[in-house]
Image (cartoon, rainbow, N blue to C red):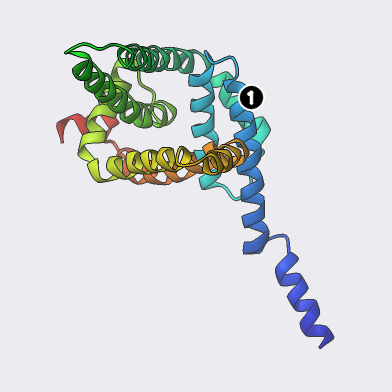
C-alpha cells in the first residue's frame, strides 16, 4: 500500500506530468495577461502589447516551458515600431466608429439608422481585419499595407475560422452584458487570464491557417492568388 501511495504522489506531483504542466500553463497565461494589461495602460501602446502577446503565445505553444516575462519584454522591444503604427491605425478606426455610434444614437433624423448600420459594419470589418493583422505582423516580415491586404484575403479564404472567432467574441460580449453578475464575473476572468486565454485559442487557429505559408518556398503573399 505504501509503494502504491508513493507512486501516486510521484505521478500527481512529478515535475513533468500532465497535471503540473497544465498548472504551469495556467500560471503562464495569468502572468502574460497581467503583462498585456499593464502595457496596454498608455492606450497608444496597445498595438505593441498585442504583437507582444501573440509573439509569446506562438512561442508558448511550441515550447513546454518559457520565461514569460523576459520573452514578453523582448517582444515588446522588437515589435515597438510596427506595433505602434498598427495600434494607432486600429484606435483611429475603432474610435471613429464608436464615436459615430454614440453621436448618431442621440439624433432623431432619417439617415441616423443608416449611419449606425454603416458604422457597425465598419467596426465588425475592422475587428476581423485586426484579428488576422496582428498574428500576421508577428509571424511574417511585411509592411502595414501587405499585412492588411493579406488579413483581408485570409479572412475571406478561411471564412469558417473567421466566423468562429467573431462568433466567440460576439457570444462573450453578449454574455458579459446579460446581467450585472455576468458582467462582474466576466470582467474578473478577463482581468485574470481572459485575453491571454482567448489569444491562445486564436493562435491555435492561426497556426493551422499559416501552416501552408511557413517553412516552404511559398510566401504569405501567395494567398492573394488563391
Q: Give the residue furthest to the right.
A: 2
- In the image, is residue 112 above or below residue 57? above
Q: Residue at x 49, y 33 (%)?
A: 54
Question: Is 47 left or right of 153, judged from the image as shown?
Answer: right
Question: Is 87 left or right of 73, judged from the image as shown?
Answer: left
Q: Quadrant of the N terminus?
A: bottom right
Q: Decide which of 221, 150 is in the foreground and name it.
A: 150
Q: Decide which of 131, 225 is in the foreground and name it.
A: 131
Dividing the picture into quarters, in which one does residue 214 lie? top left
Q: Quadrant of the C terminus?
A: top left
- In the image, is residue 37 above or below residue 62? above
Question: Is 123 left or right of 185, judged from the image as shown?
Answer: left
Mark count? 1
Q: Residue 7 at what x, y percent from top left? A: 76, 77
Q: Residue at x 21, y 35 (%)?
A: 156
Q: Residue 146 at what x, y percent from top left? A: 29, 20
Q: Decide which of 199, 141 is in the foreground and name it.
A: 199
Mark 1: few, some, or many residues within 10 Å (few <14, many ≥20)?
Answer: few
Q: Residue 217 at what x, y percent from top left? A: 28, 36
Element under disc 1: helix
Asked whether residue 66 appears in the rendered view, the answer is: no
Asked whether residue 80 appears in the rendered view, the answer is: yes
Q: Residue at x 66, y 51 (%)?
A: 24
Please give the residue where the numbered disc 1 appears in the rendered image: 38
Q: Residue at x 75, y 65 (%)?
A: 13
Q: Give the residue furthest to the front.
A: 108
Q: Residue 210 at what x, y percent from top left? A: 34, 40
- In the image, is residue 174 above or below residue 89? below
Amino acid at each position: 500500500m505504501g509503494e502504491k501511495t508513493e507512486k501516486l504522489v510521484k505521478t500527481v506531483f512529478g515535475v513533468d506530468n500532465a497535471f503540473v504542466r497544465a498548472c504551469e500553463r495556467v500560471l503562464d497565461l495569468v502572468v502574460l495577461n497581467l503583462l498585456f494589461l499593464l502595457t496596454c495602460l498608455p492606450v497608444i501602446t496597445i498595438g505593441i502589447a498585442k504583437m507582444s502577446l501573440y509573439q509569446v503565445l506562438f512561442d508558448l505553444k511550441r515550447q513546454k516551458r518559457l520565461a514569460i516575462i523576459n520573452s514578453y519584454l523582448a517582444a515588446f522591444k522588437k515589435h515597438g515600431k510596427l506595433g505602434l503604427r498598427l495600434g494607432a491605425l486600429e484606435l483611429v478606426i475603432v474610435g471613429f466608429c464608436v464615436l459615430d455610434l454614440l453621436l448618431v444614437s442621440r439624433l432623431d433624423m432619417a439617415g441616423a439608422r443608416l449611419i449606425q448600420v454603416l458604422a457597425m459594419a465598419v467596426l465588425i470589418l475592422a475587428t476581423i481585419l485586426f484579428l488576422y493583422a496582428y498574428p500576421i505582423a508577428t509571424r511574417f516580415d511585411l509592411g502595414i499595407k501587405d499585412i492588411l491586404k493579406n488579413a483581408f484575403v485570409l479572412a475571406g479564404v478561411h471564412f469558417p475560422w473567421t466566423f468562429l472567432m467573431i462568433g466567440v467574441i460576439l457570444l462573450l460580449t453578449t454574455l458579459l452584458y446579460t446581467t450585472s453578475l455576468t458582467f462582474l464575473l466576466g470582467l474578473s476572468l478577463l482581468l485574470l487570464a481572459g485575453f491571454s486565454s482567448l489569444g491562445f485559442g486564436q493562435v491555435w487557429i492561426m497556426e493551422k491557417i499559416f501552416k501552408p505559408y511557413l517553412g516552404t518556398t511559398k510566401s504569405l503573399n501567395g494567398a492573394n492568388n488563391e
